[in-house]
Amino acid sequence: MLSERAKNLKPSATLALNAKAQELAKAGRDVISFAVGEPDWDTFDYIKKAAHDALDAGFTKYTPASGISDLKSAVVDKIKSELGLSYESNQCMVALGAKQAIFNALQVLCNPGDEVIVPAPYWVSYPTMIELADAKPVIPVCPKETQFKLTPDLLKRTLTAKTKAIILNSPNNPTGQVYSIQELKNIAAVLELTGVWVISDDIYDKMIFTGESIAPHIAQQSEKLRNQVLLVNSVSKTYSMTGWRLGSIVGDKRVIDACSNYQSQSASCAVGFAQKGAVAALNGPNDQVGKAMAELANRKRAAMEALHGISSLDVLDPMGAFYIWVNISKLFGKTSPSRKEIHNSTDFSTALLEDQGVAVVPGIEFGTEGFIRMSYTLAMKKMLDGLGRLKKFVESLE
């Protein structure tokens, strides 16, 4: 009955795990979830007020498929002020989140048989979105020795005549690692010779702990490459607007026009009054964002200290986003108190949830076995409670 596309479609692993945790919580279990990728604080008041004002003013109808002009201007102005890159507003399209922006780009760029490079560890939805565009995900696995980042040599070995695009994500979900200026220059030097499109997922670009105000961008590093780069971003993480479903894509006008036309035939447009809220977010003061980042930094320090206290785990200090990539491979072959054998990250995550009510995401969902991803966007007390349960679980394994 169903199409082959539907039969092969997997649900989002992170959303599925969060749903499982919520299901256990409804059944009366005390569950602490490190699985979902969103801040735990509310959208800032000035943003909500802008959306309320738009509703009160009757801004409730269709907008252009590519988004309202105020928001497109705010997006390109932000890119100019923060990255020093100049784009016109007609080179920007507003999508229903960064996820749809990437989905649209893949749909309009890829033909059957094309290849798209996705360095692993990767965000869980990239390969599926590529497959839904009838293209093939090609996945080079980046080792711990390179801080899980793509190198020019590995990129060269992965490129073929069929390569149409590459997806880069920095700061990275799930590892929290950030590409340096030199690393991006080296990657750009390889790509500028190829004509391959670069889809740069910048959704965590301001959530950074390197001392910089924003993560370095590959489009800054090569004048030759710039026209091949598509900049994808969102208000979801920085402004805690995950449920508002607003993202953007900026770049070559031919691609942007095609993405807009594609969206006009699928979702029509992003929600109008939500777009007004996004304008306020991008044009508003940065003091609340700064306070949120200071709180995240405190939580990261506390989480890293607790994890370093668990001798069987190996962790690399994240430089951005709000995730910690935890190596659990030393625990494979052990057995949980409920007599479940731990052979992989899925076994570990399932047993941890069932035994201690702690939800994490298995590393295999990000293309790399032997790890779990933990989000530290929890209130400090709850986060430390959850990490204490994790330690108890690890120490209980036989």
Image: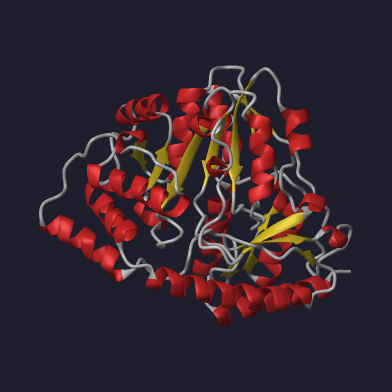
Query: Where is residue 8 drawn, in percent x and y?
Result: 59, 30
Query: Where is residue 142 drawn, in percent x and y?
Result: 76, 44
> Nearest the camera: 187 or 339?
187
Q: Is residue 180 left or right of residue 154?
A: left
Q: How is the image coloured?
A: secondary structure
Residue that sits furthest to the left in the current view: 57
Which residue corresponds to the image point at 36% horizontal and 34% vertical from the top-left?
91
Q: Is residue 364 left or right of residue 211?
A: right
Query: Where is residue 266 drawn, in percent x and y?
Result: 34, 30
> Eyeballing the image, is 183 above or below 351?
above
Q: Is residue 111 left or right of residue 96?
A: right
> Eyeballing the image, is 21 above or below 104?
below
Q: In which quarter of the image is residue 340?
A: bottom right
Which residue corresponds to the image point at 69% horizontal and 54% vertical from the top-left?
362
Q: Quadrant of residue 111?
A: top right
> Eyeballing the image, is 324 above or below 72?
below
> Nearest the camera: 297 or 314?
297
Is residue 365 in sight in this rendering? Answer: no
Is residue 379 in sight in this rendering? Answer: yes
Query: Where is residue 207 drawn, in percent x and y?
Result: 53, 62
Which residue corresponds to the image point at 40% horizontal and 53% vertical from the top-left?
81
